[in-house]
Amino acid sequence: MNDELHEAFLDLSSTLTGYSRFRLLGTGQADPYLSTTREAVGEEVLAELLNTYTDVHRDAGDDEKALDTGLRARILSDRLLGPVARNVIKMWFVGTWYELPQEWRDVQATRGHDSTHVVSPASYTEALLWPTIGANPPGAKAQGFGSWAAPPTIDAP
Amino acid sequence: MPAPIDHAAAARTDYDVLVVGSGVSGAIIARSLAERGLQVLIVEAGPGEELSVAEYETHLTRFYGAAAKDNNSAYEVNPNAPMPRSPDVRRLQAGHPDSTSYLIQNGPYEMDSTYTRVLGGTTMHWEGKALRMLPEDFQMRTRFGQGRDWPIAYDDLELYYQQAERELGVSADVADQTFYGITFPPDYVFPMHSLPQSYLDTIIARDLDGTVVQLEETERTILVRPTAQSRNSIPNPAYDGGKGYVPVGAVSTHQVDQGDRCQGNINCVPLCPVQAKYSARKTLSFGVRTGRVDILTQTVASQVHVGADGQVSHVDYQAYGSTTSPEHVTGSLRATTYVLAANPVENARLLLASGLPSSSGLVGRNLMDHAYLLTWGLLPEVAGTMRGSQCTSGIEDLRSGDFRTRHAAMRVSIHNDGWSWPTGSPYTDLIELVDDANAYGTALRRRVADRISRQLMLSFMIDLPPEPSNRITVDGRYVDALGNLRPVLSYSLPDYTMDAVAVSRRVSRQLFQRLGVEDRTHYDPLDPGFVSHQGDGYVIRGGNHWSGTHIMGTASHDSVVDSHQRSWDHQNLYLVGSGSMPSIGTSNTTLTLAALSFRTADHIVSELTTRPSVTIEG
Ligand SMILES: Cc1cc2nc3c(=O)[nH]c(=O)nc-3n(C[C@H](O)[C@H](O)[C@H](O)COP(=O)(O)OP(=O)(O)OC[C@H]3O[C@@H](n4cnc5c(N)ncnc54)[C@H](O)[C@@H]3O)c2cc1C
Ligand code: SF4
């Protein structure tokens, strides 16, 4: 895997999910998610997404407001990149790649595997939604007998 | 673990009893008879090579990897012994039956209840609520002028309820479960203590306990109580006169115990990863250990034959080698006594397909199931929703009272899994926050936690009395991959039940007002199960508590089985399970059908031992 792409994907993912690169790496899902995105949207769109993000990030410097504005202006509201970015968020949170919207597919004949699917059994159990709400994925990583009687521990971002 | 037996060997063996179906009702009968020396063969339509942990993990991986996690998603599609799946259910057009999925929906109401055809049956994915019925539920006609009376009373079943609570490993405390006429012997304790109530439950109890609800002339004061459940908790040392109780863990050929107590996986439906929850495989593995239970899986009972003497003479079967091919072999099996334990829909389907509607004509009729009304909203504070087992507490106070002359009774569950049943939460919440609310990053994290951890969902489980027009039939136009007739369902809800639906909505509003819950309930007219009643619309869900299709009674002209679940028409045939129940009240049906199975096993033993040819050991 190309290191630069990989790094850019992690940076983008960290901004989009609100979780640190370190935390994202800990799930072991960065590679599978990058591959899943590439297979669904193709090399060119993926490169455009990551390059745009790198530019936005560089232009914003340390200014969080500028990063937010840039991200919304150049990625999230972009007809091509917006839906892909939103899919990357959803993939991190629940481990599922959702089929891109019809409008996107009309414009951009998708390259490959774009139907809704769980990336892998591990991506389900590693999904970030569960720690976000202080719970465990149903059917995995249980918190132990009686743990549910206490208030939840939700890490405030 | 099923003892290695092939069909040829089984056909040569003289079995005392042939049991069709390896679910909890069949498993209890098989184990109970084998422990008393009888030789039993179980035929099971679904797959399940061994009672092993490895196979369990295959189910689990299939579940993790399934995009749509419905309650049968852990089980492979099997055209040879198909089962209903709730996402298959569609909105019906008046007058047009929907035959696109296994269960044909003839309407007028859609029904999204399911069951599971695999070794161990539907308890492989049941939720595990283990409730006794109220004494008044057995006397619906006498007490309330509705539905039917049972030929037996609560007191006749009490001892069998105790056996069922042992077999199903029920966790509860007597003090919590003594209400509205339910009684226990003076020194009785449940096998295990109650499961801890969830943090969500304690928030609800704090604000709801003491609320007064008016149902017709009946006034009820709400008390949130822990729910009796078949999942492992802390054993009660006082059980069985101080002998205590050893929880049953994972079943497996190699007996690796994967941890006994419930860990709060919140995944009892479709499958408990640590087997802390009871499934019939636990009972089956004890049965097999007697050396007197043989099991043939992937073996569909296809026809029941009756001889000139009115007795069942043999049962035809179809055995298939693979779930992906309809290729199969056929043959016949014989025993002294026959037990159909294939569940209410399949028992009726098999009898009707065999041309045995019973002399009363009631096979398949009087189908019951609980009608579920769901209401949901957001609590004013974080409640830690999505932790613990599906439900740890409920409200029992709307189950009993004279109002039952006017409208049905209901039982309320507090759901630890939030809005997942009505809305598909938490997935749908996440999608909405990302796609529509345009949230990302740390703001998204905060909003996800805020939206999901404050969810409250109540389910109202509403009684449905037996109506002859609610029924399972068969129709030569509809067959499965092996050529067996598929079940056709006709279903609607009487005013008695629909009035209680409206009352439930009203009570829910009152409870939400008391809790300060932002009501988010809405019923979509395009959803299956949408019903209008007195100007308001509701979505009614199925309760998965199929019952009544071989209803029990006091005489052959108006019932199918007697109080021992023996067919009035065929003396060596027993039809077991919730299909025999004349009413379902407001209790999930399994504990009661398990109690009935123990009672029937006693009866079969006493019948067979009066025959000189059988010797009973121990
Ligand atoms: C999602 C869900 C949640 C539930 N939760 C609860 C709960 O919390 N509490 C409760 O009390 N109940 C609950 N239930 C209901 C409970 O699961 C059933 O009441 C119970 O499992 C019925 O047991 P049974 O042995 O009668 O039938 P089943 O468990 O359905 O077993 C019947 C067996 O017969 C086999 N069979 C069928 N046809 C044939 C044939 N022709 N030949 C050979 N074998 C055949 C089937 O494959 C199956 O293994 C729930 C059900 C569902 C679906
Ligand atoms: S909550 Fe989990 S561990 Fe407990 S019984 Fe259910 S699935 Fe098993």
Image (cartoon, coloured by chain):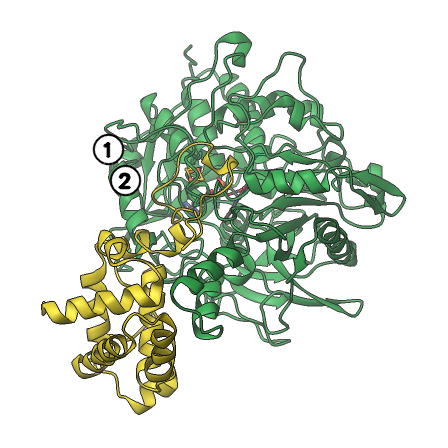
Label 2 and label 1 in one chain: yes
Horizontal arrangement in the rendering, residue B121 relative to residue B412 (left or right): left
Horizontal arrangement in the rendering, residue B114 relative to residue B224 (left or right): left
Which tint was used for chain A? yellow
Q: Position of residue B446 (x, y in %)?
A: 46, 59
Foreground pick, B118 / A95: A95
Judge whether residue A25 can be spotted in this image: yes
Q: Position of residue B273 (x, y in %)?
A: 35, 40
Dot 1: what SS?
loop
Q: Amino acid at mark 2?
A: His
Foreground pick, A79 / B554: A79
Judging from the image, mark 2 belongs to the subunit labelled: B
Mark 2 sits on what residue? Answer: B7
Which residue is located at x 54 percent, y 12 percent?
Answer: B238
- The image quarter containing residue A19 is bottom left
User: Split into 4 quadrants, where in the image is the N terminus of chain B?
Assistant: top left
Q: Position of residue B311 (x, y in %)?
A: 52, 37
> Where's ligand 2: which quadrant?
top left
The residue furthest right is: B217
Which tint was used for chain B? green
